[in-house]
Image (tube, rainbow, N blue to C red):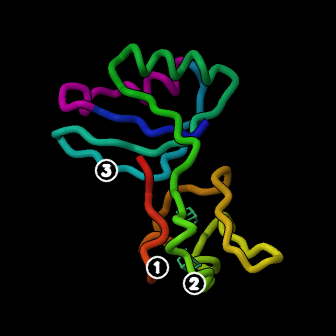
Amino acid sequence: MKAWLKFSPNIVNKSIISEAIKKYDIEFNILRANITPRGGKMLVEISGPEEREGIDFIEEAGIEVHPAVRVVKKDREKCMDCGACVSLCPVGAICIEDDWEIVLDDRKCIGCSFCVNSCPTKAIVLLD
Ligand code: SF4
Ligand code: SF4
């Protein structure tokens, strides 16, 4: 699953994630991270046969886990289908439909923000 993990200042220095990896043999793929001593958040992909148990473990340890069904959102009204974002997406999550509409695939998106920063009309925003 893809999820935002939120860290409060009192747990930011604890090795909860590495403990979960060792204990439940789960994989954490970090897609984005903004962590300081005052806390922060991380967008991750979590996988493995004991994924649920690992997530329960990190939640019990104090990390908030928020499933990220959508990482970016495109405003249809603002998008002018210029296509500038398509070639910038490193994972092919943006494509041009037969009717020339630009469409984002949430399952592929890794939240890199390249499309957000490149859009001339600010039609794409990063969710959290
Ligand atoms: S945030 Fe990155 S991965 Fe997601 S659609 Fe935009 S360019 Fe692609
Ligand atoms: S760069 Fe912005 S305006 Fe252009 S197609 Fe992408 S989302 Fe639409």
Magenta range is 8-23
Q: Secondary structure at mark 1?
A: helix
In the image, 91 versus 76, the foreground residue is 76
| Alpha carbons under labels 3 and 1: distance apart | 21 Å
Q: Amino acid at mark 1?
A: Ser
Q: Position of residue 59 (x, y in %)?
A: 42, 19
Q: Earlier in the sequence, mark 3 or mark 2?
A: 3
Q: Report if the beta carbon of the residue with label 2 is closer than 8 angstroms to ligand 2.
A: yes
Quarter holding the N terminus is: top right
Asked if marks 3 and 1 touch (Cβ < 8 Å), the reply is no
Q: Amino acid at mark 2?
A: Ala
Asked if marks 1 and 2 touch (Cβ < 8 Å), the reply is yes
User: Does residue 78 sit above or below 126 in this rendering?
Assistant: below
In the image, 73 versus 115, the foreground residue is 73
User: Does residue 55 sit above or below 39 in this rendering?
Assistant: above
Q: Earlier in the sequence, mark 3 or mark 1?
A: 3
Q: Circle 3 is placed at which residue position?
A: 34
User: Does residue 42 sit above or below 91 in this rendering?
Assistant: above
Residue 21, labelled with which disc?
A: none
Q: Position of residue 58 (x, y in %)?
A: 43, 21
